[in-house]
Image (cartoon, grey):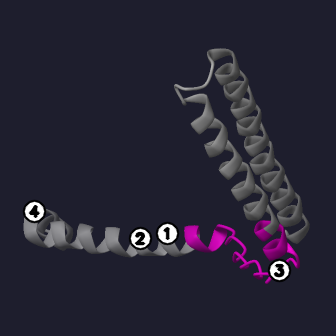
């Protein structure tokens, strides 16, 4: 029996040699594959811009002031619309006026929202 036949007939030695040969081949192939791939460029963090817009405090304060006046007027009109001692046609007038004040409040909120969006768009 030759050395080759003895080697191939012994299962433990033959199996270990195949495992070692496979490991060496895989490790070599891994290095070759990983080096051939292009590495992605590092992601650069965007600098944070500290943007302060002058006048937003005044804008918000005047908005809240106008809104509080409108809300007080709305409470007054709804109180008169629900008063039983007032004639029903006048109650309907108060209800319509309260509806107009509600629309004014919604428009005021929308105007502030749009103004803040325009100002924040200038900042970014």
Query: Mark 3 vs mark 2: which is more N-terminal?
Result: 2
Q: Which label number is shown at residue 20? A: none
Circle 4 is placed at which residue position? Answer: 9
Q: Residues within 10 Å of mark 2 (few under 14, many from 20)?
A: few
Vertical order, 21 against 91 (above or below)? below
Q: How many marks?
A: 4
Q: Secondary structure at mark 4?
A: helix
Q: Quadrant of residue 120?
A: bottom right
Q: Which label number is shown at residue 51? A: 3
Q: Is residue 56 magenta?
A: yes
Q: Nearer the viewer, mark 4 or mark 2?
A: 2
Q: Residues within 10 Å of mark 1 (few under 14, many from 20)?
A: few
Q: Are marks 1 and 2 in contact (CB under 8 Å)?
A: yes
Circle 1 is placed at which residue position? Answer: 29
Q: Is residue 80 magenta?
A: no
Q: In the image, which residues are magenta?
A: 33-61
Q: Quadrant of the N terminus?
A: bottom left
Q: Which label number is shown at residue 25? A: 2
Q: Residue at x 70, y 75 (%)?
A: 43
- Magenta residues: mostly which secondary structure? loop
Measure how far apart labels 4 and 3 are at the Cα level: 78 Å
Query: Mark 4 vs mark 3: which is more N-terminal?
Result: 4
Measure how far apart labels 1 and 2 are at the Cα level: 6 Å
Horizontal side of residue 54 vs 93, given as left or right? right
Measure how far apart labels 4 and 2 are at the Cα level: 23 Å
Query: Mark 4 vs mark 2: which is more N-terminal?
Result: 4
Horizontal side of residue 104 vs 39, given as left or right? right
Q: Are marks 3 and 2 in contact (CB under 8 Å)?
A: no
* Camera-nearest residue between 27 and 50: 50
């Amino acid at each position: 029996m030759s050395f080759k036949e003895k080697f191939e007939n012994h299962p433990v030695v033959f199996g270990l040699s195949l495992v070692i040969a496979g490991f060496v081949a895989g490790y070599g192939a891994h290095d070759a594959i990983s080096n051939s791939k292009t590495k992605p460029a590092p992601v650069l963090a965007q600098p944070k811009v500290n943007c302060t817009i002058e006048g937003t405090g005044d804008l918000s304060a005047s908005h809240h002031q106008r809104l509080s006046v409108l809300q007080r007027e709305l409470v007054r009109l709804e109180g008169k619309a629900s008063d039983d001692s007032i004639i029903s046609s006048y109650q309907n007038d108060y209800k319509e006026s309260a509806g107009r004040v509600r629309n004014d409040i919604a428009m005021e909120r929308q105007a502030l929202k749009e103004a803040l969006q325009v100002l924040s768009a200038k900042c970014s």
